[in-house]
Image (tube, helix red, strand yellow):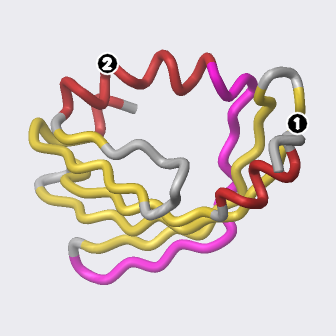
Amino acid sequence: MVAHVSDGFANVHTSALGLPSDGKAEYRARLADFLATFVGLTYEVEEILVEGDRVVAAYVMRARADGTPFEIRGVMRLTVHDGLIERRVDYFDSLSFLRQTGQA
């Protein structure tokens, strides 16, 4: 995944539970913990829209957190330049995640 982002990659999260990051190095450093937290992580793409250097992808994210399965819908807005993702803005419902994992 890291190979597809630019050195100045901005990873923006609008969700209260999301953790933004700036730069490819920081994204790489956080990725292992993210993948360890969300065991069996998959994204099912429901729809993709492309206009110039902008991509919008609606998805269903599925994984297990602390052994509890969950499924949440979200949308990512991507800005691509020279074949690399420069900016990702992710929208998902934190409350749905908390409810499904028994935290709310």
Q: Which residue is mark 1?
A: 69
| Label 2 Cα crowd, 10 Å radius (few <14 / some 14-19 / many 20+) | few
Mark 1 and mark 2 residues within 8 Å of each other at the beta carbon? no
The picture places residue 49, in percent across and down from the top left corner, at: 47, 79
The quadrant of the rendering that contains the N terminus is top left
User: Which residue occupies 31% across, 18% down?
Assistant: 29
Of mark 1 and mark 2, the one earlier in the sequence is: 2
- Residue range highlighted in magenta: 37-52
Vertical side of 62 occupied by 31: above or below:
above
| Label 1 Cα crowd, 10 Å radius (few <14 / some 14-19 / many 20+) | some
Q: Which residue is mark 2?
A: 29
In the rendered image, the residue lying farthest to the bottom is 51
User: Which residue occupies 12% across, 54% down?
Assistant: 82
Which structural element holds mark 2?
helix
In the rendered image, the residue lying farthest to the front is 104
The picture places residue 15, in percent across and down from the top left corner, at: 51, 60
Say which quarter of the image contains residue 31. Answer: top left
User: Which residue occupies 81% across, 42% down?
Assistant: 103
Q: State left or right for residue 77 relative to residue 35.
A: left
Give amino acid for label 1: Pro
The picture places residue 63, in percent across and down from the top left corner, at: 77, 35
Say which quarter of the image contains residue 37. Answer: top right
Which structural element holds mark 1?
strand
User: Which residue occupies 25% across, 51% down?
Assistant: 85
In the rendered picture of this protein, how many numbered marks are placed on residues? Answer: 2
